[in-house]
Amino acid sequence: MRFWLIFLAISTFTFAAKVKFTRWDKGVTFEQYLKKFHIDKNIIDTLDREDQALISEIGYTHKYYELIASNGVLLQSLIPIGEELQAHLFRTHSGYKLEIIPIAYQKDTHIAILSVDKSPHYDIINKVKNRRLANEFTRLLKHSIDFRGVQRGDKIVIVYDQKMRLGQPLGVPDIKVAMLESHGKKNYVFKHSDGKYYNADGKALIEKYMGKPLNHLIITSPFTTRRWHPVLHKWKAHHGIDCRARRGTPILAAADGKVVYSGWMSGYGRVIKIQHADNYLTLYAHQSRLKAKVGQFVKKGDIIGYTGNSGRSTGPHLHFGLYKDGRPINPMRLVKFTTDGLTGKDRENFLNRKRKYTKIINKIEEENLPSYVWNTVNDMYVLPKMKTYYQNRGW
């Protein structure tokens, strides 16, 4: 939060400076961004190896903030890296400095209730003002609903967590439960404590999606979005998993997709990125040799390159990253997805969770309670009384 105070203070006292909130240009690297403002790219070397790798992830569809003087000089910028951390670039009397800091955000539970006028996807965007929520709802329900049969007047209820940053939604909404009532039948999707989605019968909705990027996975560094390092006394993150492998080990495409990048990326060295279905993207870094080319369509299990230690790396290994709508997520969560149902204690816990969710959804629907959402992308209108109501019921 102190960095926002600095940001606002500078904008207050630097009368001619303006704050810009804009989307990162597609394909632009952080080094190109520095060059635009005549900043020495060697400033990246002031970061440690892990943070230098994080800088390489800048370039997705995130929006960022800039404070620019009237003469075009960049005074400060805050550029998201995922949903938890951001690059803080700022000008001082002795030159520019660069650091990785947490993103200050507020996370709340929101409840959206609406009737279908045209289609679920269109109406969620139009009434809730959240395109990513519409995308997530469609992605989850399409496994059990034929949207072509949805009619005008069908009802939708969604309970989800949303991060907000200065009045703007940040990242992909985390849907806890969603219900579409169509033709007199209520179709539910529940998120369980294991992070997976199940239908009312406790069956996983998403089939096994990702394969292993190496024939033998030996994970040496796990995934983490944000943690306070007790020794270094700074925020650290690792947006992927590191897998030990001898130089030259074949790297396999984790799923069918299109190669959207094959080349050099600063901290990550030789990198291949593959775009998959449902807006997933995989990243394979530190390769010794690239095989797949940009524009090429690859199948799950195809060899796309070979392990190495290019870029900022201490030894041969594969850094494997997985992104959903530009948001880094733990690859192992998706690699382990199966269609197996829940059994034993897991099933008992799920049924308890399902009863709680269903009771709340039914209560909301029966009483036609007002939705707890924002009305525009610039302003957020929250009903405090309703927030208390939902919190008292376990949300």
Image: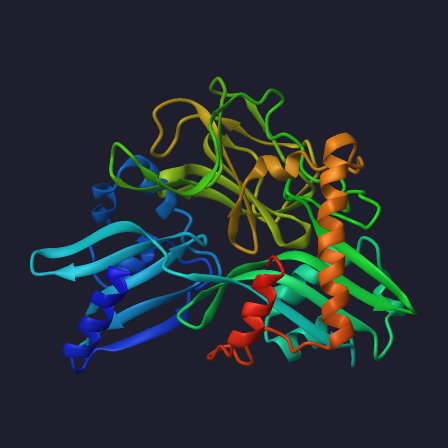
The answer to whether 54 is drawn above or below residue 370 in the figure is above
Quadrant of the rendering where the N terminus is positioned: bottom left
Closer to us: 155 or 353: 353
Judge from the rendering whether residue 302 lies leftward or rightward of residue 1; answer left or right: right
The colour scheme used to paint the residues is rainbow
What residue lies at 19% left-to-right and 70% top-to-bottom?
73
Along the line of sight, which residue is nearer the eye, 357 or 242? 357
Residue lying farthest left? 93
**Nearer to me, 284 or 158:** 158
Residue 36, by quadrant, is: bottom left
Q: Quadrant of the C terminus?
A: bottom right
Indicate the position of residue 370 as horizontal and vertical percent values.
65, 78
Judge from the rendering whether residue 55 lies leftward or rightward of residue 172; answer left or right: left
Question: Residue 10 location, x and y as percent?
Answer: 18, 72
The residue that appears at 68% across and 44% down in the rendered structure is 196
Position of residue 394 relative to residue 374, above or below, is above
Check the image and name the residue furthest to the right. 183
Percent x, y of residue 166: 39, 70
Q: How many marks?
A: 0
**Residue at the (69%, 42%) spot, across then down:** 256
Q: Is residue 114 left or right of residue 291?
A: right
